[in-house]
Image: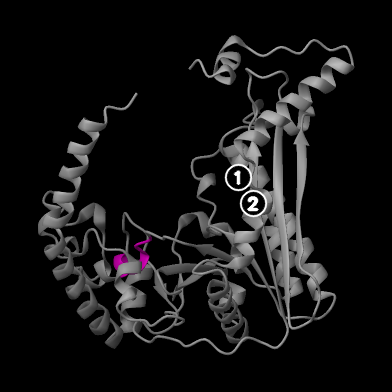
Amino acid sequence: MLNWSKVARQIDELAASQVSGLADWKRRLGQALVDLESAEVNLARLVDKVRQSQTSWLVAEPVESLVRAYLPLPRPPQVTVAATDGSQIAPDHHEVVLCYLLNIGRVMLHYGTGEPPVLESVPYLGYLEDDLYQETNGRKVLVQGDLLAIRRTLFEWEHLVELSRRAKERDLPTVALIDGTLIQWVLEGKAEGVQQYFLQRYLALFEQMHTLEVPPVGYLSGTRSTDVVNLLRVYRCPQAVADCDHCAFRRSLELAPCGELEGLTDAALFKHRMLPGQRTGLFFSQSKVLQQYGRHRVAFFYVHVGHEIARVELPAWAALNPDLVELVHTVIVDQTQKGQGYPVALAEAHEQAVIKGADRETFYHLLTEALVRRGVTAAVSRKSWRKRSGLI
């Protein structure tokens, strides 16, 4: 049980610390905005420096101007927006049987065609040996946690490709949206076999999107990314090639020229440079995770959607096609206007996908009933029973 009087005192301390640091934060932001303008002057040289540098943080590689704000075009008379999202009930050793449930929300919104929207969910129950276990380094591991997230991601993308194919059969401009990043950070540190299992399938789906000429787009709301701020840190570095491991200031980082930008985000930086609807220039991500992505290497831009700055990611082949970039920009702005600051297609996909607490209880109730009808003893562990009973 929470002691609210103690929590309240700590909240007051937090608020006080935020206020005390605000003036310094504004000063550092002002300096970063000055740096952004001056970095634009020698942009080609800065790009070379970024490519040669060895940093301990992700650095954006500029593709377009650092300071220009790009306006959206009018939305095409006819366009289709596809979106998927997913949720899950993870396998639980304490329940009646070991299995998991994935639920994929599928949405296809047509504009200017008069066609009804597609709003549906597709469940998948994993209970077979191949569903439940993944071979890793010569041994079988239960599919849970990150491994389950990987499988769910693949299901989401498989359905997104299917929706995109259906839209392109009618030869309509189409954008495919997914909530979150296209960079699969979940693979970092995973066994080689797991990485290859995922990447082969993931990039094959991207290849199908490339064939369809449908840009797959990752939308990140509330982004805390610092890739462009880190670009300015490289710009500030006095060394010809930034090398964090051999930095002269590594024993006193607060004195390093790049330390002046600590605590700033890309969203804060660009909020002062754009009006609602405008986007930044394009950047390439320098994440090592992308080394095997080839032409699907991830690029991104930031867009002002009214109440926040969102990050929009797309593969390199789409980012290097001006027509597709303009289509993505226009659709994102239109979708966030319709969804009051968040793409309406993604919001609908989430509603179709979400599994609520009551759904989980119904799922296990149906599972128990089905087993009992077939004469199978179905019992949960005492731990699970106590949780269901509300005793813990």
Q: Residues within 10 Å of mark 1 (few under 14, many from 20)?
A: some
The numbered dot on residue 199 is 2
Label tally:
2
Q: Which residue is mark 1?
A: 195
Q: Amino acid at mark 1?
A: Gln
Residue 340 drawn at (x, y percent):
51, 69
Q: Secondary structure at mark 2?
A: helix
| Residue 149 vertical position relative to residue 297 in the rendered view, above or below | above
Q: Farthest residue toward the front?
A: 5
* Magenta segment: 225-231
Q: Residue at x 71, y 23 (%)?
A: 98
Q: Residue at x 12, y 65 (%)?
A: 23
**Mark 1–mark 2 contact, CB under 8 Å?**
yes
Q: Residues within 10 Å of mark 2 (few under 14, many from 20)?
A: some
Q: Residue at x 78, y 27 (%)?
A: 366
Residue 318 drawn at (x, y percent):
61, 76
Along the viewing direction, whichever of 362 and 263 lies nearer the viewer? 362
Q: Residue at x 66, y 45 (%)?
A: 152
Residue 106 lies left or right of residue 182; in this view the side is right
Q: Farthest residue toward the right?
A: 374
Along the viewing direction, whichever of 301 and 198 lies nearer the viewer? 301
Q: Quadrant of the N terminus?
A: top left
